[in-house]
Amino acid sequence: MLISQRAAEAGNLENGERGYWFVKGLPFEYQRHAIAKTGADPDRRSLFDFYRLKKVVEDRVRASEAAD
């Protein structure tokens, strides 16, 4: 289980903050892609929807794997 998942389940981490953490852990190319596709604003962490960001990144990884 992810640390962010445990913190979110315990009510100690908002979805936006969790999304921000998620994006910050990605390589820069994926950060830019996820932010652009979801409209997340680095100045407003509340706009970082973890679940939307995760889906966009998963889709990008699948597309990259299919291209190989």
Image (cartoon, rainbow, N blue to C red):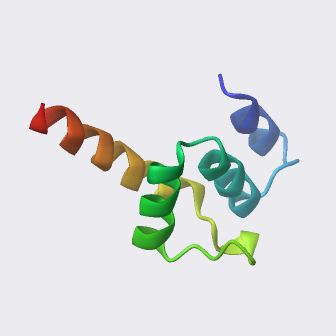
Q: Position of residue 59 (x, y in %)?
A: 29, 48
Q: Is residue 62 left or right of residue 51?
A: left
Look at the picture and state if 66 lies above or below 14. Answer: above
**Nearer to us in this view, 37 or 12:** 37
**Nearer to us in this view, 21 or 55:** 21
Q: Outermost residue, right direction? A: 12
Q: Outermost residue, left direction? A: 67
Number of numbered callouts drawn: 0
Q: Is residue 17 left or right of residue 50?
A: right
**Nearer to us in this view, 4 or 65:** 65
Residue depicted at x 75% and y 29%: 3
Q: Outermost residue, front direction? A: 28
Q: Position of residue 58 (x, y in %)?
A: 36, 43
Q: Is residue 52 left or right of residue 4?
A: left
Q: Is residue 40 left or right of residue 44?
A: left
Q: Position of residue 17 (x, y in %)?
A: 76, 58
**Nearer to us in this view, 44 or 32:** 32
Look at the picture and state if 21 lies above or below 64. Answer: below
Look at the picture and state if 45 lies above or below 18. Answer: below
Residue depicted at x 65% and y 22%: 1
Residue depicted at x 63% and y 77%: 41
Which picture quadrant has residue 49?
bottom right
Q: Position of residue 10 (x, y in %)?
A: 84, 40
Residue depicted at x 69% and y 57%: 20
Which quadrant of the figure contains the C terminus?
top left
